[in-house]
Image: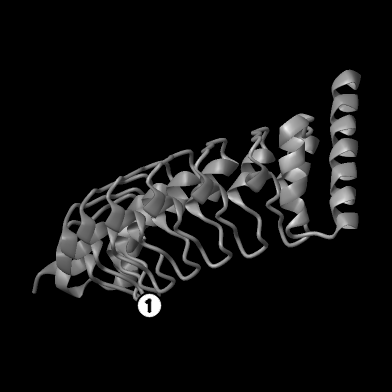
Amino acid sequence: MNRNDILTYEQVVAQVNEGKFFEDKEILKLHDKNGWTVAHEQAKQGWTTGDKEILKFHDKNRWTVAHIQAEHGWTTNDKEILELCDKYKVSVAHEQAKRGWTIEDKEILKLYDNFKWTVAHEQASHGWTTNDKEILKLKDDSGTSVAHVQAYHGWTTEDVEVLTLHDTYKWTVAHEQASRGWTTEDPEILKLCDEDNLTVAEIQAERSGWGPEGEVKVRFIQELQKNFSEEEVQETLRNIDSLAKEYFKKILLK
């Protein structure tokens, strides 16, 4: 009988923990009660393989050897491997994206986990950007779009359709951009408000010292009047004026 035939999972893992890696597929298949294989354990310690059969080995949570390799910085562009998902629908592509890897393939970018967080969301959270509206509009369960994530990291757009995208709290991409210093003079964008009736205009006043003037002010008031009472319109204008003054006061005190 071959010596390898009598090795138990525990015996093999003990050797792996001492720095020995195995390549024999039959040994790599050995697993504990949770389905955690020798290959998983080796990958956890930095070992890699390109063998698809081994990469697909998974435990009870469907966490594959490929997922572990991705955690350690290994990457692949093989769609069959990138699409492998655990029980929470977290794909290998998600894991790679968490570590700065990017891809432009729409099928992969659209992969989403149980919270509808896509690979595109993950890439955007690490600085990647796209202007593809189909991708920008992708939303997770909270309504956060890829565009929101990009805006959070400093990306801006002037596209009205994208600016008006909002999450479940009615926080728009325009709100997000304004909170980082971007400004617009478009009354239709300025009037956008979240569920607390906080307008984009108010955020611009707070973060940039912006205030409506001339024709922009006239049109802005007209837009507000479509959705708010006259009292609410005046309150919004007072808020803008107050926030703008506070902004400049802070600038002077610096």
Colour mapping used in the image: one colour
Residue 42 seen: no
- Residue at the image point whose x is 79% and y is 30% from the top: 209
Q: Residue furthest left?
A: 1
The x and y percentages for residue 146 are: 48, 51
Residue 88 seen: yes
Residue closer to the observer: 93 or 218: 218
- Residue at the image point whose x is 53% and y is 46% from the top: 160
Q: Amino acid at mark 1?
A: Lys
Return the residue at label 1: 60
Element carrying mark 1:
loop
Q: Is residue 219 above or below residue 137?
A: above
Crowd tier of the residue under label 1, counting other residues whose Cα lies within 10 Å: few below 14, some 14–19, many 20 or above? few
Residue closer to the observer: 250 or 99: 250
Q: Is residue 26 above or below residue 121?
A: below
The x and y percentages for residue 165 are: 55, 55
Q: Is residue 210 above or below residue 188?
A: above
In the image, is 39 to the left or to the right of 114?
A: left
In the image, is 176 to the left or to the right of 149?
A: right
Quadrant in the rendering for residue 35:
bottom left
Q: Residue furthest bottom?
A: 33
Residue closer to the observer: 184 or 137: 184
The x and y percentages for residue 248 are: 86, 25
In the image, is 125 to the left or to the right of 167?
A: left
Residue closer to the observer: 206 or 191: 191
**Count of all numbered marks drawn on residues in the image:** 1
Task: State which quarter of the image contains the C terminus.
Answer: top right
- Residue at the image point whose x is 30% and y is 53% from the top: 106
Task: State which quarter of the image contains the N terminus.
Answer: bottom left
The x and y percentages for residue 101 are: 36, 42
- Residue at the image point whose x is 21% and y is 63% from the top: 54
